[in-house]
Image (spheres, rainbow, N blue to C red):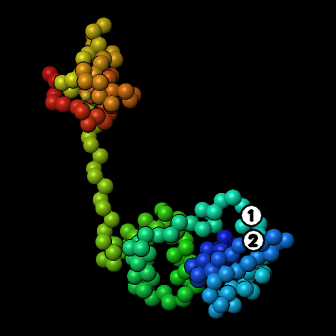
């Protein structure tokens, strides 16, 4: 087990580890948990001191999961009959560190009816062209196939390839169908 896992899993057990002056480590928390973790902490003392000296607390202690998410993961662990406390803690910790992996697990759990299905993202709007929009002002130079203008200055008109009459792009202000 590496120093990051030790810190996070010990925290899961209600413990906190801090670096003290003169290269000492202080372990605080329930005495039974301290007794369990002391040998591990001693064996990795140098790595833990190095880690605690780093200025990146979010890496070693990822933010907690939302309570409903953690409850869903616990239901998942129950459903797959995972009873080993260490593996359960490791699993929850890995979900805190890996949002993509967490989404995958939650989708699987939803497929099996253990948690509500995640919201389905709204479908992307269809691409349109400025040339088919009532707000479009065609280029007056040449045959009109050049860069035109947007009569309402829609935000999308400032994004390439808008204003080229036949270039598909996304614009929520597109209106009607120009002849
Ligand atoms: S940017 Fe949008 S609103 Fe403006 S002309 Fe093009 S499609 Fe129409």
Q: Is residue 79 above or below residue 72?
A: below
Decide: few, some or many residues near mark 1? Use Cα within 10 Å; few <14, some 14-19, many ≥20: few
Residue 47 can be seen in this image: no
**Badge 2 residue CB within 8 Å of ligand 1:** no
Q: Alpha carbon of mark 2 to alpha carbon of mark 1: how far?
A: 8 Å
Q: Residue at x 72, y 86 (%)?
A: 38
Judged left or right of residue 69, residue 122 is: left
In the picture, which quadrant includes the N terminus?
bottom right
Judged left or right of residue 25, residue 68 is: left
Q: Which mark is residue 53?
A: 1
Residue 68 can be seen in this image: yes
In the picture, which quadrant includes the C terminus?
top left
Q: Is residue 91 above or below residue 36?
A: above
Judged left or right of residue 104, residue 35 is: right
Instruction: Report the front residue among 179 and 7.
Output: 7
Q: Residue at x 65, y 59 (%)?
A: 56
Q: Which residue is mark 2?
A: 19
Q: Secondary structure at mark 2?
A: strand
Question: Which quadrant holds residue 10?
Answer: bottom right
Q: Secondary structure at mark 1?
A: loop
- Answer yes or no: do the residues labelled 2 and 1 have beta carbons within 8 Å? yes
Question: Which quadrant holds residue 34?
Answer: bottom right
Query: Extreme top residue here?
Result: 141
Question: What x and y, as percent, mark residue 7?
Answer: 65, 74
Instruction: Report the front residue among 26 and 150.
Output: 26
């Amino acid at each position: 087990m590496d120093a990051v896992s030790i810190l996070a899993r010990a925290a899961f057990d209600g413990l906190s580890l801090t670096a003290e002056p003169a290269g000492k480590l202080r372990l605080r928390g329930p005495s039974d948990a301290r007794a369990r973790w002391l040998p591990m902490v001693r064996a990795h003392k140098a790595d833990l001191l190095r880690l605690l000296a780093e200025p990146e607390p979010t890496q070693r202690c990822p933010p907690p999961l939302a309570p409903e998410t953690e409850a869903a993961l616990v239901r998942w662990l129950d459903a797959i009959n995972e009873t080993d406390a260490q593996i359960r803690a490791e699993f929850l910790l890995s979900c805190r560190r890996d949002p993509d992996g967490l989404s995958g697990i939650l989708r699987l759990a939803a497929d099996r009816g253990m948690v509500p299905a995640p919201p389905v993202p709204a479908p992307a709007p269809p691409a349109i062209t400025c040339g088919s929009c009532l707000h479009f002002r065609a280029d007056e130079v040449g045959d009109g196939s050049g860069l035109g203008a947007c009569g309402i200055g829609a935000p999308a008109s400032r994004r390439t390839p808008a204003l080229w009459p036949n270039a598909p792009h996304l614009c929520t202000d597109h209106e009607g169908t120009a002849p």
